[in-house]
Image: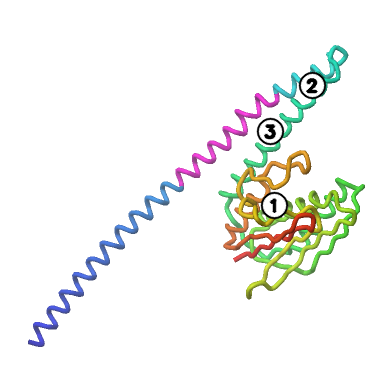
């Protein structure tokens, strides 16, 4: 009887092992199929990026070029309204060019190979602030950057994320009487979180779910320029580092963007 029970148990184990092997083989095939689909999608994305870069820039250059000729050679024949329309054509083509650049940047950060190393985020933020001051010397902005603030990640991608976050803080404090921007580290929910904080325009948290989707804007274009791609780029970069990105804000009281890096 004992031998029969043992044989039955062995047979059951053999059946279970065979079933498990078949399941693993099936999962491996599905994984290989998903990997192939992802590779194909990435190839299509790259082809689309090249197409956008080359096929759309040509017509845009033509529009802007002919508009410039009209402006320079036939300005006297245009009334004030005509010159206004012409300026809007050129501004629209320039905005489309910026949008193309931002879309290509978003595509690049999605597929760029990661090279992780120790990165001084505080030093990067100070460099970004210095560059913003050189571009806009008339602005008076109080900045505070905690140091040293090190992280482990891809320095090029993290710089791109911080350029967007600090650049947004600079932009949205443009109408603040005493603009302030800060970068530091806080302990939130048991985790170290980096943050970029400003006392600018802020936003209604009821619309926070739209922040990181491409082309979503919480302020009118006439009030603050932008393409709606920057925060989507930051979100992709933080996600690729295994981290999380979120924001806290209030209209007219500024905003704080927090992120972790895995």
Secondary structure found at label 2: helix
Name the side, left or right, on which 92 lies relative to 47.
Answer: right
- 233 relative to 248, above or below: above
> Magenta part of the protein: which range?
39-61
Q: Is 199 displayed left or right of 246 in the figure?
A: right
Q: Quadrant of residue 162?
A: bottom right
Residue 171's x, y, as percent?
80, 49
Q: Please tell me which of labels 1 and 2 falls first in the chain.
A: 2
- x and y percent of residue 101 in the render? 67, 39
Q: Secondary structure at mark 3?
A: helix
Q: Is residue 103 magenta?
A: no
Nearer the observer, 74 or 84: 84
Q: Which residue is mark 2?
A: 68
Q: Where does label 3 land, which residue? A: 96
Image quadrant where one finds the C terminus: bottom right
Of the numbered discs 3 and 2, the one sitting upstream in the chain is 2
Neighbours of disc 2 within 10 Å: few (<14), some (14-19), many (20+): some
Label 3 crowd bin: few (<14), some (14–19), many (20+), radius 10 Å: some
């Amino acid at each position: 009887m004992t031998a029969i029970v043992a044989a039955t148990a062995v047979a059951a184990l053999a059946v279970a092992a065979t079933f498990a092997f078949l399941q693993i083989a099936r999962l491996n095939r599905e994984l290989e199929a998903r990997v192939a689909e992802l590779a194909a999608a990435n190839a299509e994305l790259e082809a689309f990026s090249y197409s956008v870069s080359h096929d759309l820039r040509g017509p845009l250059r033509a529009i802007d070029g002919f508009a410039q000729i009209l402006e320079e050679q036939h300005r006297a024949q245009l009334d004030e309204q005509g010159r206004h329309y012409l300026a809007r054509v050129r501004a629209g083509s320039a905005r489309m060019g910026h949008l193309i650049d931002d879309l290509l940047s978003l595509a690049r950060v999605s597929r760029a190979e990661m090279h992780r190393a120790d990165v001084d985020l505080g030093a990067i933020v100070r460099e970004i602030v210095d560059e913003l001051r050189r571009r806009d010397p008339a602005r008076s902005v109080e900045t505070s950057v905690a140091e040293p603030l090190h992280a482990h990640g891809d320095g090029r991608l993290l710089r791109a994320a911080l350029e967007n976050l600090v650049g947004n803080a600079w932009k949205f404090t443009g109408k603040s009487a005493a603009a302030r921007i800060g970068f530091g580290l806080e302990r939130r929910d048991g985790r170290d979180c980096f943050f970029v904080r400003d006392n600018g325009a802020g936003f209604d948290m009821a619309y926070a779910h739209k922040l990181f989707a491409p082309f979503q804007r919480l302020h009118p274009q006439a009030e603050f320029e932008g393409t709606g791609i920057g925060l989507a780029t930051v979100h992709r970069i933080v996600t690729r580092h295994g981290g999380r990105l979120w924001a806290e804000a209030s209209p007219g009281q500024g905003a704080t963007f927090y992120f972790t890096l895995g």
